[in-house]
Amino acid sequence: MPTAAPRRTAPRRTALRAATFVLAGAAAVLALTGCNLDFQEDVCNTGEYPVLAVGGSGSACMPNGEEPAQGYARYPEGKVPRQLDDKWDVYWRTHTLDKDGNVIDAPDAP
């Protein structure tokens, strides 16, 4: 009796199966590693540092090595915002410094 030739898998089916395995593997890696795909924008560019408007809730960025412009002050140590919407960025929206460097409620806060 003649033997039947082995059945070949269609190339399209093999490619689909491989793509499914790759996508499933990528999804598993993201789920298991807790990979955070959120993007956070820095408050200032490289070579700059953030400063706070005295008596208001405004802010600006100054070049490293330069003192803050008139009407602005450095943030208190340990309370400097680094990324938009981080803990300190949110805090300073409703607080500011008075002319003596004391933290006060911002008069123009929302």
Image: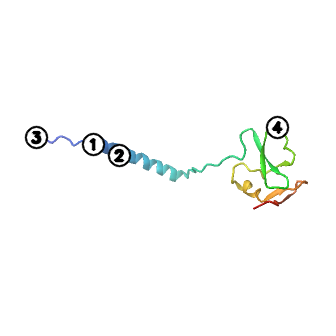
Q: Quadrant of the N terminus?
A: top left
Residue 64, position as x, y percentages in the image:
79, 39
User: Judging from the image, what secondary structure is the residue with disc 2 in?
Assistant: helix
**First along the sequence among labels 1 and 2:** 1
Q: Which comes before the other along the chain, label 4 or label 2?
A: 2
- Residue 55 in the figure: left or right of residue 9: right
Assess disc 4: are there few (<14), some (14-19) or many (≥20) residues with their C-alpha within 10 Å of its C-alpha: few
Residue drawn at x 72%, y 57% is 90
Residue 34's disc is none
Specify the amino acid type for callout 1.
Answer: Ala
Q: Residues within 10 Å of mark 2 (few under 14, many from 20)?
A: few
Amino acid type assigned to the residue bearing label 4 in the image: Gly
Between discs 1 and 4, the one toward the N terminus: 1
Please indicate whether residue 61 sits to the left or right of residue 31 in the image: right
Rounded to the nearest angstrom, the CA distance separating label 1 from label 3 is 24 Å
Tell me the SS state at disc 1: loop
Q: Amino acid at mark 2?
A: Leu
Number of labels in the image equals 4
Task: Check if mark 1's residue and mark 4's residue have beta carbons within 8 Å.
Answer: no
Q: Quadrant of residue 44?
A: top right
Which sits earlier in the primary sequence, circle 1 or circle 3? Answer: 3
- Check residue 2 in the rendering and tell me which mark sits there, or answer none: 3
Q: In the rendered structure, which amino acid carries the disc numbered 3?
A: Pro
Label 3 – label 2 distance at C-alpha? 33 Å
Residue for badge 1:
10
Give the mark nearer the N terminus: 4 vs 3.
3
Q: Secondary structure at mark 3?
A: loop
Of discs 4 and 3, which sits in the foreground? 4
Which residue in the protein does label 2 denote? 16
Q: Which numbered circle lies on residue 65?
A: 4
